[in-house]
Image (cartoon, grey):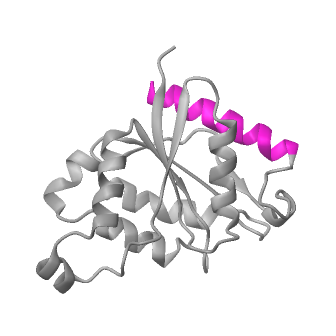
Amino acid sequence: MSVSRIVGVAGSLRRGSLNAALLRAAIELAPEGLEIEPGSIRDIPLYDGDLESSTGIPDAVSRLKDQIAAADGWLIVTPEYNNSMPGVFKNAVDWLSRPSGDNVRVFGGKPVAVIGASPGGFGTIMSQAAWLPVLRSLGMRPWFGSPLHVSRAHKAFDEEGRLVDPSVQERLVRFLEGFREFIG
């Protein structure tokens, strides 16, 4: 079996992020034939066209762009803030799409899947839906298999951020197996 290599990026900067914990669980539970390499948005500054003009693309952006471009797919692990995607994560994608001439190399036709965890009762349904127009405009190929919205996520993880809910673990593995098959 060939191995598909994907980049997983959690869209929160908080140290105790439930979504960073979900990404760590995905890395740990990745099925045979799927390798998940973590990426980070932590050092990406606020997008500023003047900054781009004067100093170019920041190193943190270039590193993540190259990481995504080299991967077979991208796993977005998104929080939900005010019924939408987090601004810090959208900001990172705005930087990743610069300069626009590089979008085909980084995003063009690349398989992408979106998951997320939230302490609320609806998981990250609205945030995941908000990502779809962005992914479409970048020319990505979203996977619409069995969705993974981890609601009441503070109960699914222990104090150290380990995924301890067996039902969520099982759903995560099924999700990752489906995404691996979609990548091909």
Could you tell me which residue is drawn at 79 percent across and 53 percent down?
162
Q: How many marks?
A: 0
Judged from this view, the residue extending furthest toward the top is 1
Is residue 96 visible in the rendered image? The answer is: no
Residue 174 on the magenta span: yes
User: Which region is colored magenta?
Assistant: 166-184
State whether residue 132 is above or below residue 169: below
Nearer to us in this view, 38 or 4: 38
State whether residue 40 is above or below residue 148: below
Q: Residue 36 at what x, y percent from top left?
A: 53, 40
Could you tell me which residue is drawn at 70 percent across and 47 percent down?
25
Question: Which corner quadrant holds the C terminus?
Answer: top left
Could you tell me which residue is drawn at 61 percent across and 67 percent down?
79
- Give the side of residue 50 with respect to residue 34, left or right: left
Nearer to us in this view, 107 or 32: 32
Determine the main secondary structure of the stretch shown in magenta. Answer: helix
Q: Residue 120 at what x, y percent from top left?
A: 77, 71
Residue 126 on the magenta span: no
Nearer to us in this view, 60 or 172: 60
Q: Residue 182 at what x, y percent from top left?
A: 49, 30
Is residue 99 visible in the rendered image? The answer is: yes
Q: Quadrant of residue 90?
A: bottom left
